[in-house]
Every structure is written in structure tokens, then in C-alpha cells.
Amino acid sequence: MSRQRGHITKLLLICLQLLCVAGTSLGQVLDKDQQLNAQSFWDNRDFDWYRQNIPFFECPDADITTTYYYRWDLLTKHLTYGSPNSGYSFTEFIDRPFWSGAYGAISCPAGHQLYEARWLKSPRIANDYSRYWFRTPGAQPRNYSTWLADSVWAVDLVHPNRDLMIDLLPDLITNYEGWSHRQFVPDVGLFWQTGHDDGMEFNINSRQTQDILRGAPSYRPSFNAYMWADAKAIAKIANLVNETELSQQFDAKADALREKMIALMWDERRKFFFPVLKNDEHRDGFEMKALSKTYETGKFAGDTHGRELIGYVPWQFNLFRGESRYEVAWKKLMDRDGFYAGFGPSTVERNDPMFLLQKSCCWWSGQSWPYATTQTLKALANLLQNDGRVLTNANYVELLRIYARSHRKDGKPYLAEALHPDTGSFEGHDAYNHSEHYFHSGYCDLIITGLVGLIPRDDDALELYPLAPPNWDYFALDDVSYRGHQVSVLWDKSGNRYGKGTGFHVLVDGKIVSTSSNLNRLVIPGAVPLTRPNAVAKQGDTTRTNFAANNDGTFFPRWNASFTSESTSLGKIHDGNYWYLRHPPNRWTCEGTANAEDWVEVHFGVARAVDTVKLYVLEDSGRTENSNEVSPIRAPQRIDLDAWIDGKWQALPNGNSQSRIEGHRPYVVKFPTVQTTRLRATLVHATGHVSGLTEFEAWGDAELPLERLPHPPGNLAYNGGASKFPRATASHHDRFGGVPESANDGVTNFLPTPTNRWTSYESPEESDWLEIDFGKQVECRRVELAIYDDRGGVQPPDSYTIQVHNGSGWRDVEGMRKTPERPAGSQWNVATFSPVTTAKIRIVFLHHGQSRSGVTEVMVWNEPMPRD
């Protein structure tokens, strides 16, 4: 009997071992499902995506580990599929502010974002984003300081792609020359920049000038370090393609910059790098002299402070590798009279005469900024991994812990633009629908390259220099895609956690290539030979393409739905962004519908070869996000998917879809490729609830670029800009670019940016009109209005009427029917009426309360029914 029990015990142990490795592939050390399920904060619960795309990590510090996974969730909130031709990019703010570029990207944090995205297992997202800055109309690569060439090179170190480097090299040079033409001063040998355009508003230097927000032109350590890094990167890329003269030219530019930075920015008395004024500046009766450093002249002349975190930025790029003379500057980082704080570091040293904490955006005069903290930690890791002696590995881990702990609000993972360095409060810096879950910094790269110490190189050697404490019992970085290989790095003090024995282990493609008893520097020659180089897509190649996205406001893809809640927007499900929070909203819902089921439809305008549909399903249960309201939004009980084929709707098979429809993750339906012009998803609401989506994607293979479809014929109001008529005018238009001409240019955009709309914002009248002058007599019977709604000063009108001009005056059209009857924002509103012949048509809006009306597009047709 005891022998039988022994056999049963052995069988149970075998079963348990099998269960432990379930869900992991050959060579993986960590159970990915176990790691994901250990976290409770998830907004995006698409665990399939994480398993397929991110390296996995664990360590004994719960805050460090939780923040690591939160940062990947945060990345998905900002990941944007801008268009089929541009591919992926990132936003900084969650709401695409008006000063952002195409698809909401802002260049200021692009370097941080690319350093993070390079660790995704597929290089597509990072490579798309690299190309975005130079190939996408509306991108703004030089609106703010950033280090684009360096970032492109950093991505290539992880996912080598020589073809892409060759392809981008002319763009990188053009970008560098653009900066040089505008902001390089040959007589000084440095680049100037304002604090505002360096991403650092209201700083201690700008506040001593006439413009305390923007500041005066200065030679700043940050911006010049970026330009040094970009010059070095261009030199390396040029060397890759045997452009020796070009490589030497940019190396020389970098060397000259470095020499001038040391000569003009280093203060031997204060042992730090400081900004240097370009011109004489005056404020409050004090003068600051050109070419003087912070506090050398002006009101605080001779003060011993003036240090800002930007003094450490040169080390972010290893500009002073091996230069121990300047390392003394780092003493201030861990000094409580310097930058050290419980939720810091602060951007300015504590006892500075201009040190100031504000509960409002965007003060760099003492607050803790994750943007700058990322730079400082990256710089510190470089210092330590190059054998700097002023600070220690323990200091890095301590600051990393502080940074991880700073990602919290009400005990939950969160990040905003800035925080109080002593309390960790984001008060005043996370305005509603603005900087929530803000993506202007890095973290995962600090874990991978700093704490774990995987140092990317441009050869086949694998280098590691972990800064993690040796007294930790364990840590693991698992399933890292690096140079076409899968790399895992383990520390197991007892040898019992990972089953590889005691000590420090490095695995490549599942095999141990190095073991050490200590956490020391390792260089393993030939460990990662480049066996699977990536390549740029060539003519005839196909790319996975989401045909449903429409951020450009073109007529196609065109969207319609059976019902749209007044508080949501149909435009949100094709903007290339998805997240599931109620606030800020990024959703289309059926809240308020009387239907048991509702549908949403996309018309591509041309047949597309589609094989996969992804519907990102909302579920508000238990997730009120700063609201006490009980939301009715739940995942639907069923979703039916149809395609328009041979002139009728035909059901698509969903046998390959996931078995359950769950909120906070995509419902994925795969099927044999179909050629279709339209797709429709019908959501059968759960009993007592209604459904909603945050994104609708339709994927297939296509050869890029896709041609832009022409505006369809028949729209009598359309003016592509080549002729005087049709002409749009209005009784009033706003002063922020909302001009009438935007209302008939063929572009429909319900998003805050780009500004493509007419509004009557700030009109003194309770009613305003928008008029289309056709320039000739036409017959019409239908008007379509894309009503704009910013939920603030511009909202849907209480009502609208349509009038035509009869030669002597205006009269209302007859037999008008509206869909919907009550004007709805962020969607198309359709009004049909009895046929009428006229040279002019006018839409008269009765405004809602104190708000004013607006439309992003108006179309006029002589067709009784919507087009197929």
C-alpha cells in the first residue's frame, strides 16, 4: 500500500511539474501567466499581447516589479496606429493636445519612448515610430529638443536592421542640419535652446527673464548633449555603410561640441554643468550677461547654488565616459541639501534661492519630473557601469525604488506629468483628460539595462553589468529579444528558485552561456551572433495592415452605428488608440439605447483583403475611475460579425475566436481571407446592460503604401482647395483656427488635433449660421453634418434648421427629417428634405446654453438615401 502511495506521489509531482511549465515555451524561466496574474492593477488585460511582446521580470522588491508591468500597460495606452502608411507611433498626453503633431505625437519624449519600445519582442513598433518622425505629414521632429538619431541607433542595437539604417540616414542628417541651420551659433560652437522648447518650462533661469514660461535662448547642457549624441549616432550609422568621410565629419562635430560644453558650461567652483545665456537679459532691474552661467550675473550673482538635474544629462549618453574629473558633480544627487527627496530627485537643489514647489503645470523649479528622473537614472547607470566611484550601485537601486514608488496615486499604479518631491502627490499636475497615465519618461529600459545590466552593443558579444544588490535572493529578466536571440538573465542566491543552480546565470536561446558566483561584469564573446537580420520591406512585400483606422479624416474608411451615446464618440473606435478607463474617455458606447442589440459598421470604400477583426470590449464593472456613478457598460453576451459580399451581408465564421467575450481585452475573430468593402459588428447586450468598444480593427496583408481614396463624387459642398466655389462662410468663427473653410475641405476629424473644424466659440449670439455658396444653381435634398463636440466651450446645438436662398431671401426647407432627431456630437447627423434648387444653403444652429456650435465637415447631396 505504501509503495502504491509512493507511485501516486511521484505521479502527482510529475503533474505539478508539468503544470508549472504550462504556458511557457522552451528556454523560458518565468511562468508568464503567473507573473501577469500576480498583478491586480491591469486596465489592459490582453495577456496574450504581453506574453507575445514584452520581456518578463521579477525581483524581491514588489514596488519595482509592479511598476515594471504597469509601465507596459501604460505603453499600450499611448500606442497609436496612426494610419496604414505610417504604422505605429506614440502619444505623450493621453488626449492629443492641440500642440501635438500628427496622431498626437510630441517630439519631446520620443527618445524615452523609443528606448522603451526597443525592448518589445518585435521591432515593428519602434521602427514605425522612427520612420514616423521623418515620413509622416504633420510630424514635428524639431518642435522640442529630443535625441532622435541616438534613439534610432539604440533601437538598432537591440534589433539590428542595416537596411533601415541606410534608409533613414539621409533623414537623420536632414534633421540634424535643420537644427544646425536654426539654432547653432558658429562663433560660440554650441546650440541654443529655450527652456520651454527643451521641455522644461518655468525653470530657475527662465524666471529671471522677461518670459518666465519660455525663457531666453541659452546654451543648455541637455540640448547640446542631445545634439552630441545624435552626431555620434549619425557617425556610427554612416560607418555601417562605409561612408567614411561622412562618419568622420559627424565625429568631428561631436568632438567640437564636447570641447565647447566643457569650456563654457563647467563651473570649477561649483563643480557642475550649467546653462549659459546667449544674449544679455534683464528683469526687475537686474542684468544677466551673455555667455554667463546660472547665477554668475543678475540678481543672484555669486550664489553657490543654481544646479539643475540637466547638469547630469551628458552622462545619459556617455559623453564623459572615463572623465573622472567631472564625477564630483554627482555628490549632489544623494544629498538632502541637493537633489535627494523621498519622491525625487527634485529638478533643482533644495537650498536654491529660486527653489519653488507649485500645484500647477509646468514648473521645473523643484518638482520631481519623471522625464528628468529617467535621464538621471540612465546617466547614473552609465557612470557606474563605466566604473564611476563617487556613487555606488546601492545608490542606483535606492533611487530606482523611489522612482518605482512614485508611480502611485491612492495606492494604485499611476503616473502624471510631475509630482511633489516630498509627498509624491500629483496634485495640480494631472488635470482631467490631460496627463493621466502620462508617457513622457522611461522605466523598463532602466530595469533591463541598469538594474539587470544588459548593455546593448554593436557586435556579437553579450555584455552584462548588473546594478542589482547581491543581497537579493533572486531576480530574473526572461525572454528578451536581442539581436535575433532570446536572452534570459538570472540571479538565484540559493539555487532553488529557477533550477539552474546558485549564482548569476545568462541563457541564450534556452542554453546557459555563462555562470558566475557573483553579480559582476560579464562580457561573453560570440554569444549573440546576428543570424536573423531584419530588413526593410521592399516593393511587392506585404505588411500587416489595419484597414479600419481613420485618423486623417478622409471620407473612407467611413463609420456608422445604430446608436451612439451622447457622452461618447464613434470617432474614438477608429483613432488607433485603445484603453478601457471611464476617465479619461476613449470609447463608443450604447448607453441610453432602447435596443436589445446595436451595430457598428465600417465602409472601406474599396474591397480590402481582411482575415482578422479585433474588437476592444469595454467593461465598467468595479472600475469607476474617479466617479461614483454606476455604469451600465458590460461586455456583450454575443458579437455577430458580417461582411458585405456580393451585394449582401454575409456572416463571418467565428469558430477561431476566443471562447469568451471579456472586457478590457480584444475579442479576436480570425477567418479565411475575404474581399469585402464593409464590415459590421452586432453587439447583443447583456441583460440589463449595454455594450461599448474602445477600438475596432480590421487586419489583413497589404502592399504599402495604400493609395488615398478620392473624395466620392456627388458632394455638392466639397471644395478640395482648387477653386473659389463652393465657398463656406459663417456668421462668426473662433480665433483658434476654426474657420469656415475647414467645414467643406473633405476632412472630418472629431479629435482635438489637428484643428480641422469650424466653430462659433466665443460668439456673442445665441444662434449662428454656416453657409455654403455653390456659385451656381444646384438641386439638393440631403445635408450631412459632422458635429464637433469638445465637451466644453463647443457642444452640440439644441437644434438646427436648414435654409436655402431663393434669390431674394432665406426660407426653411420643407419636409425635413433628422437622424438623429436631437443633434449629436462627434458623429454624423443627417437631414433629408424635399428636393430644392438653390445657389446657397445655410445651417442655422441654436446653441446649447453658454456653449457654442461647430462642425468638422458639412456635405450636401442630391441623393434621397445614403450611398451603399
Image (cartoon, grey):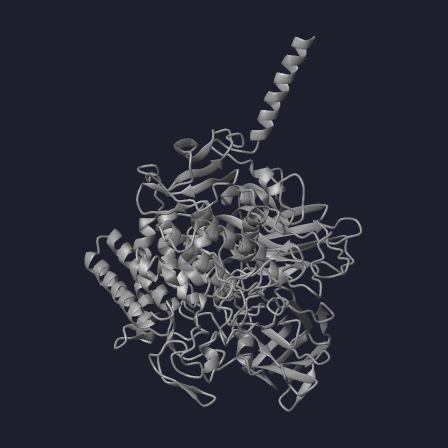
Image position, residue 677 (x, y; %): 55, 53
Image position, residue 698 (x, y; %): 55, 51
Closest to the observer: 790 or 469? 469
Closest to the observer: 262 or 845? 262
- Residue under the point 21% across and 53% down: 242
Closest to the observer: 463 or 236? 463
Res. 180 image quadrant: bottom left
Res. 845 image quadrant: bottom right
Q: Is residue 16 visible?
A: yes
Q: Is residue 676 visible?
A: no
Query: Farthest left residue?
Result: 245
User: As displayed, is residue 102 above or below residue 464?
Assistant: below
Res. 657 image quadrant: top right
How many numbered discs sit on the rendered protein? 0
- Residue under the point 62% across and 68% down: 431
For the N terminus, the image quarter is: top right
Closest to the observer: 237 or 64? 64
Image position, residue 724 (x, y; %): 48, 82
